[in-house]
Image (cartoon, helix red, strand yellow):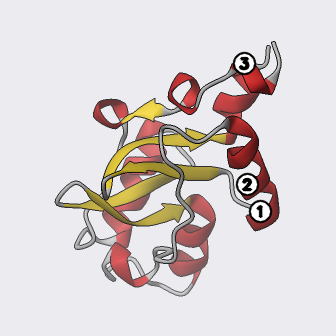
Amino acid sequence: MCIEDIDVTDVMIEREDLITANPQDKVAAVILRMIRENIGGMPIVEKEKCVGIVTMRDIMFANFYGAGELSISEIMTKDLITVSPNDDMSKVIDLMLENKVERIPVVKNGKLKGLIVRNGILKSLK
């Protein structure tokens, strides 16, 4: 299978299956959730809108400085790179490579529809 044959919706984790956090959640609570769910990052969602994304790397850095009681909104990435469900996978891959990210939210009409994770792309090429 080649990348041109794959749609964004084929590889994204659907919104209803996503593990997310709220901007007000404490860093410590998000760490626990990520460890329990064995995930490396999650979208931060407020009223169906993706307002940020946080990765285990962000959390480890913040936790190193004792930031467990901070709100996740204080350490999340707010300047998001997003794609739409209609974008082609070559665009997604280019964005991931250019921006050195492993996760890209899929957004339609301002609402979070899913999340593309690098491993999902790799599995789809198998």
Q: Is residue 104 left or right of residue 16?
A: right
Image-quadrant location for residue 116 = top right
Which residue is outermost to the left? 47
Q: Quadrant of the C terminus?
A: top right
**Which residue type carries mark 3?**
Asp
Image-quadrant location for residue 37 = top left
Which mark sits nearer the N-terminus, 3 or 2?
3
Residue 100 at what x, y percent from top left? 77, 62
Residue 5 at what x, y percent from top left? 72, 18
- On residue 96, the disc is 2
Residue 124 seen anywhere in this rendered image of the structure: yes
Label 3 vs label 2, nearer the camera: 3
Q: Is residue 83 left or right of residue 18?
A: right
Circle 2 residues within 10 Å: few <14, some 14–19, many ≥20 = some
Mark 1 sits on what residue? 100
**Which residue type carries mark 2?**
Met
